[in-house]
Every structure is written in structure tokens, then in C-alpha cells.
Amino acid sequence: MSGQSLHTMGQQHGRRSWAEPWKIKMVEPLKMTTREERVSALEEAGYNTFLLRSDDVYIDLLTDSGTSAMSDRQWAGMMLGDEAYAGSRNFYRLEAAVQRFYGYRHILPTHQGRGAEHLISQTLITTGDHVPGNMYFTTTRLHQELAGATFHDVIIDEAHDPLSQHPFKGDVDLVKVQQLIDEVGAERIPYLSLAGTVNMAGGQPVSMANVRELRALCDANGIRLMLDATRMVENALFIQEREEGYAHTPIAEILLEFCSYTDGAWMSAKKDNLVNIGGWLAVNDRELFDELRNLVVVYEGLHTYGGLAGRDMEALAIGIEESVSDEHVRSRVGQVRYLGELLQEWDVPIVEPIGGHAIFLDARRFYPHLEQDLFPAQTLAAALYLDSGIRSMERGIASAGRNAQTGDHNRPKLELTRLTVPRRVYTQAHMDVVAESVKACFDARAEARGLEMVYEPRYLRFFQARFSPL
Ligand code: PLI
């Protein structure tokens, strides 16, 4: 049925459909639940989708992190694990893959992205420093703050407007960076923290023109430019589609060029790189690398495994190569777009343009009658779970935490509920079911009353907070 509708849409819009460049070899049965079971599961979870048991979830769109399906080649690679404590051959395969596809010189494995964020923040930041970035990410900003820095959002204003059609809403506003330099002095800015794509803005990309300009600005002021490469492969697709001169450049070449303007990167390999666990940190500066390599043994493990098993590093090395294939990236982002376009057809408010890894429902427009302090995005995530057992994630006031100085809620302009699509896991029919459930919640929107937070952890509160319905 979905094939039929896609075919019809293809004719209407004069577009050629894509299909997944893989076929399914093994399946994992899904559990359906009754509404009563979901009511009791949600109450037990304190209305927080992070606290649900995955056995009580039907289609899991909580995150695209560590939830991808590995290929037969990656699974075969798992059998080639060299579990030596030191000098595992799989480390050298991983090192070569990062060098080849991302272009950095020195590489350290870490257990996942935040392990790398911790190392780079502790090494580069001194108490009282300032770190500008293109919108915050939860773990990234927290590690910068724990190392003693103040984070400054320097993304372009359009990123905070869910309806702005700017093609590169992840771009940094160079005027904002210059203002920060003038205010605090370049010597108090250890690095600029650049993420491609920008998760909290809706999976929005950074242009090649912007990273080139940033390189020049950073050079002029002696500031490092560090990349969060977590979804940089998806960013490369947007450059191919939208930026002049790149329409015929392969994703792999775009990725290499983009990274070449930066001094290093941290990576949550659980996203783009198609593994269930893993991360890495890469830099070009040998002296900096020596410091990082010393610190990794304190927190992660020896520098040739960094908290990963040999087999994990092998799967990761293979995943990196698979992740930069044009067919793969097109079908991955294409599936996200398919879901988003269905919702747009039904006038469900979402962040536009449609981003790389997820559809972000705009909870402010979804529930215009709910104040932000009533957690509209969390309320929507709960409603969606109750309707169909689909799990989504709040990306609004709960995720934004509290201001480190004043203790008040951070109140982000964007109040979003994220439908995050794992890579190579769900079919188009699943996307139809998701869209129909969102539509049912939209039709029942007037009934939503909001939530109250009844338990709030100190760090990254969204993971473990509990709510109760009003
Ligand atoms: O979850 P980690 O520790 O492997 O990675 C942290 C991390 C860093 N940067 C970015 C842009 C992320 O999106 C990210 C993790 N994201 C999660 C878990 C997510 O659900 O989006």
C-alpha cells in the first residue's frame, strides 16, 4: 500500500522514488500492547519515555543512537575481534578508516560520544573560558560546563524559527562569534564547537561556505575549530543537494573537504557510523593528541581500545565505510522525509525544512493552549505513546535544563517532540503507522492538559525526570 502511495506521489511531483539499498535477512518480532497496558506502563515510567521498558514499546523512535541495524559484513566483522588488551588489530583498522574517510591524523577510540566530549573538554578548557557553538547539545554543553566554560549559542537566528526555510539552519552567525571575541577576548575561547547536523535545531545542516568562513575567522584569532561529527555524513547529503557546486560530488568527498577545515572531531559512532556502541576522538595536532592519549587511559581504557571490545572496533571500521555510500545516505534521509511529507500533507506542525535524522513535531503549534512550563513536548510524547505504543523524545524545556547561574529553567524557543528514525531498521509501512498515530493525537489536541515535573535529577534531567498529568 505504501509502495502504491509513493508511486502515486512520484507521478504527482514528477519525482523518482528511491528504495532501500539492502534487503532483510533477519527479523526481530515487535510486541503490540493494549491501551490499558500502555496507561499503566506510562504511569510507572513517570510520563517520561526514557523510563519505559522497551518491551512495552511498539515502534521505537526515541533515538537514532545505537539503534541502527548492522549489516551482514559488520556482523561477520564481529567474529574477527582481536581482544588483546594492547595493540588490537581492529584498532588499526578503525584508525585507518577514520583517517581515510574523515581525514584526521590522530585517532582515539572512546566508549561513545560523551566519552570523547569529556576528554576534549577537560583537555582544552580552563575555568572561566567561553565556548561558542551552533546551538547546544545536552551532553556536549554539560561537559563544557563541567570543565569550567560558559557556553554561547552562536547559531543563526533562523535556526530558532521552526518555519524558516533557510537551507542551512545549522550555520554559525559570524557576527555573534566576533561579538563574543570582542567581549571576552580570543584567548578565553579555546575552541569553537561546530556540530553538523544540528540535532536540537531539527537535524539542520551547516554549509561548506560557512565552515570555510569559520576556518578563516578562527585562524585570524588563534581559535581552534572542533567538529561534532556525529551526523556529519547526513550533513554532507544536504550540501550535495543544496549547495552550488556539489551536486555531482560524492558524499565521501564532501565529508573529507568539510572535515579538512576543522582541527579535530569527536564522534558518537552510534549514529552515522552504524554501530550499537562506540565513539572516537580525532585531532591533527600531535601535542594535543599526546595529552588526550594520556587522559584516555584514566577514563576510557588503553589508547588502542578506549572502552571498546576489539569486535566493536571492527564493526565500527566497516560501518564507517558503509555510512558514506551515497545510496545509503539518500535512503536513510529519504525515509525521514517520507514520514515528514506525510505529516505536512495533513497540516501537522513540524520543523521545516525536514532534517536528517528525525521529524521534530512543533509542540508549541501542536498545543498552542499549553504554556511552556506545562511541558508541551513531553505531553505530546506521552500522548503518542498512549495512542499507539510509539516512543518519541522530548526536545524542549525539560531537555534544556536549568541556567547554571540563575537556577531557573532554560526556556528554549524550540519546544519539540522528536520522532527519531533508526538507520536500516523500520520500513515505510512503519512510517505510515507512525504518521497516522501522530495525526490521531493532532485531532485530539484540545484534550491535552500538560504535565508537572515531580522529580528532577541534577544533571541531564530529561533522562530520569518524573512527571504527573495535570
Ligand atoms: O550518546 P553519545 O554519548 O554517544 O553521544 C553524545 C552526542 C553528541 N553529539 C550529538 C550531536 C548527539 O546527538 C549525541 C547523542 N545524541 C543522542 C543520544 C540522541 O538521542 O540524539
Image (cartoon, rainbow, N blue to C red):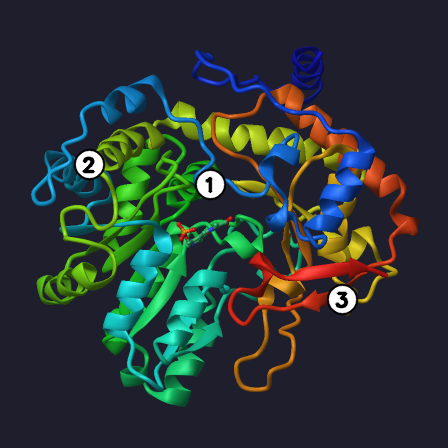
Which amino acid type corresponds to the residue marked 3 in the rendered image?
Gln
Q: CA distance from mark 2 to mark 3?
A: 46 Å
Establish whether ligand 1 lies closer than 8 Å to the Cβ of label 1.
no
Residue 344: percent from left, percent from top: 74, 37
Work out whether residue 466 or residue 439 is closer to the camera in this orientation and state it: 466
Work out whether residue 217 or residue 360 is closer to the camera in this orientation and state it: 360
Q: Report the residue at 71% width, 15% height from top.
A: 5
Q: CA distance from mark 1 to mark 3?
A: 31 Å
Residue 48: percent from left, percent from top: 67, 53
Q: Which mark is residue 238?
A: 1
Which amino acid type corresponds to the residue marked 1 in the rendered image?
Phe
Residue 5: tell me if it is visible: yes
Establish whether ligand 1 lies closer than 8 Å to the Cβ of label 2.
no
Q: Report the residue at 28% width, 72% height from top.
A: 122
Q: Residues within 10 Å of mark 2 (few under 14, many from 20)?
A: many
In this figure, which residue is indicated by the disc labeled 3? 372
The answer to whether residue 342 is above or below residue 259 is: above
Who comes first in sequence, dot 2 or dot 3? 2
Work out whether residue 250 or residue 349 is closer to the camera in this orientation and state it: 349
Q: Residues within 10 Å of mark 3 (few under 14, many from 20)?
A: many
Q: CA distance from mark 2 to mark 1?
A: 33 Å
Is 462 positioned to the left or the right of 26 in the image?
Answer: right
Residue 93: percent from left, percent from top: 15, 35
Q: Report the residue at 42% width, 81% height from top.
A: 180
In this figure, which residue is indicated by the disc labeled 2? 310
Residue 216: tell me if it is visible: no
